[in-house]
Image (spheres, grey):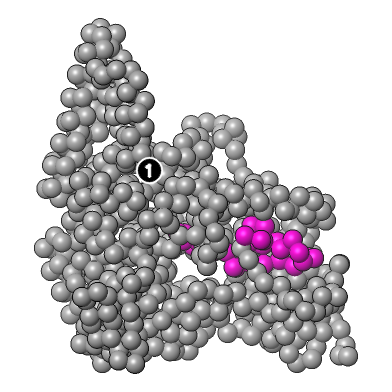
Amino acid sequence: MKQTDTVDVLIVGGGFSTMPLIRELDASGISWLMISEMTPIWKRLEDADALEFDLVSSLFSSIYSFELVEMMRDHDGMLKDGFPTARDYYAIHKKYAERYADNILIGHVDKIDNHADHSIVHVADGRHIRAQHVVVATAFRRKMNATLADLKIDQNMAGKSVAITSTGDSANMIIAQLIGFGAKVHLITNGFIALDKMFVTFSPLDPGGRYNTMDQFEVHNLAEISRWGYRALIDGGYVQGMIRPTFAKLMDRDSMSVRHPLSNRPQKEVRNFFGARAPIENGHITVKHWPIDTYRRYFGEHLEDRISEGYLLNDLPFFVDQGLVKLWDKQTTQIDRDAKQLSDGDSHSAFDMIIDGGPEEPAIPPIHRHGDAEDAYIFKQRETWLGVVPPTLNNIYMIGFTRPFTGGINNVSEMQCLLAHRMISEPEFRTEMHSDIDQRITKYNHRYYANRPPKPTDHLVYYGNYTDEVAKALDIRPSVRDARNAYDLIKYYMFPNNVFYFRETGRYKVEGVDQLIRMIAKHHHDYSILMLLCLRYPAFELLALGTIAFAPIPWWIKPFAAAAHIMLPFTAVLLGKLGLPAYDSKLIFNYRKATSFPVLAYPLVVAVTWAIGGTSAAFALSAGLLIYVYAMIHIGSAKGWNRKFFCDMQSKRAPKNVRFFEKYLEVFRRVKG
């Protein structure tokens, strides 16, 4: 037997995903060693010269808290949110790999023997390492990773027909390149939830508009006030339109779900979006894209430079609407790979090549409990507490196998690193967590999976819910009761649950995070614009319910009418259609004030009207205002004054955006050709 080395903590795989853990281990004086082949997907993409793309998550949710503080200081206290390029992001990886090189052993782990108070890790070179704690962070095996690294997309794709059997951010990145070079894409899909990466808010305070990343407007803690209201607010009727397509045809004919029904996820699955006890259920697949109108505004003046850096137009809903991507139903489409033919009923099409995706499978080396050599441990999200602590193993922790469907993965992995650190460094905490870990797992699953059967996407989480759950376990979550002034109260409800929100104070405090949060608040005018957006929902909901309450109908009908109103997303669709101003214009600002302010004043005005004129007068006021609001929103939408939060199909068909796309293609082919 080879000589056995000893270490407190052995990190298997690791790399960038474990940097927050390493930082805390060093601060605690705990020895550690990492063993890794150091060939992450980013390295493979760099070797293939395939890093010309930007992330789908924003800077503030993609970069670790301590790194953001350092970046802020390097930029004289100001840091602009946006989307880092893959090269910028990987440069940060390499910086930490160089910093910790002396603690990294290049190698491959063959297996791990787990004992009661330690583990023996067997390395491919014959070495054995005895570790009191083992952290497994070996990432996923993904067929799409190999495709991204090996697939060459260039001008030879012009006129080709390409079938793609996977839907997600990676597939959409490939689609953007194929469309750029003039290929026709056939997307064989179960549907997708498409989310805009960025949108523009216009106000008299910001001539020309202010750009906001979508994942920083998720106001997660508002769900504490009303879970149902939060769900309706956060999707602006978008997902509701998928659930109730007949209703959407009547109320929102310009929605993606109406124009392109094959883009819808299966009804039963999407209903779970609203079926869980959590604000939003785990397990959803989303595609984050640059909407063409925002892309035009944000990059239009320096288009050649931005394309060179990797910022590509990847507006999948626009591509579908323009006929550049044809959707095929995955459940019914027949794929003849030999004949290179797609068939679905009367629809047939040939393809020149096919690109397959596949599920994400954790690349975990075999782990055996001592004395049980037959069955290796298999990671299952629902059987692992917070995706980190497997109850059947001793002192072994998993990092990086839980991923967000909005926000950045570093929000998730940094919180996982903090949990692993506390489990490692505090025996009392570890004992307490293990004492009822099965009940903790059951409680979490009941809240986030809506009692549905397991599926391959169980590891995909709504990032703000997940970080919140870990913060509770670590006892570092701020409470609304901690608010000392109006700013603290507004911050609690308006600020998203980025990991650094939980590192402003407490045992895992990062110096400088308080200035970072202040800087972000200032960017959003102390959340005034965001608050106005959020206040519209309860105001519009109250108007509709008030109209029902004052209606001259029998009292026993009113509860049924109110229930029907709540079940059918009238308010959410209205808010979605009002959405945001389409551009900077005094006329539009006045129109929106004339639409919103009477509704915000409604509670006081209707109370006075009721007191003076009685129920009939209150009903007349309510019904008249409701009709007025419906008319104003629909007129504004018809004229293009309003812009929906997600998949604004009317904007995508605007002539100026279609013309811009023609310009984009010409510049893309010049730069990339």
Image quarter for residue 14?
bottom right
Comparing 581 with 438, the one in front is 438
The residue type indicated by label 1 comes to Ala
- Is residue 388 shown in magenta? yes
Question: Which quadrant of the figure contains the N terminus?
Answer: bottom right
Q: Which residue is mark 1?
A: 232
Q: Residue at x 27, y 79 (%)?
A: 343
Q: Residue at x 15, y 67 (%)?
A: 658
- Is residue 346 shown in magenta? no
Q: Residue at x 64, y 48 (%)?
A: 443
Q: Main secondary structure of the magenta part?
A: loop
Q: Residue at x 43, y 78 (%)?
A: 357
Q: Position of residue 104 (x, y in %)?
A: 70, 81
The magenta segment is: 382-410
Total label count? Answer: 1
> Taking 44 as reference, is 617 above or below it?
above
Comparing 228 with 70, the one in front is 228
233 relative position to 28: left or right: left
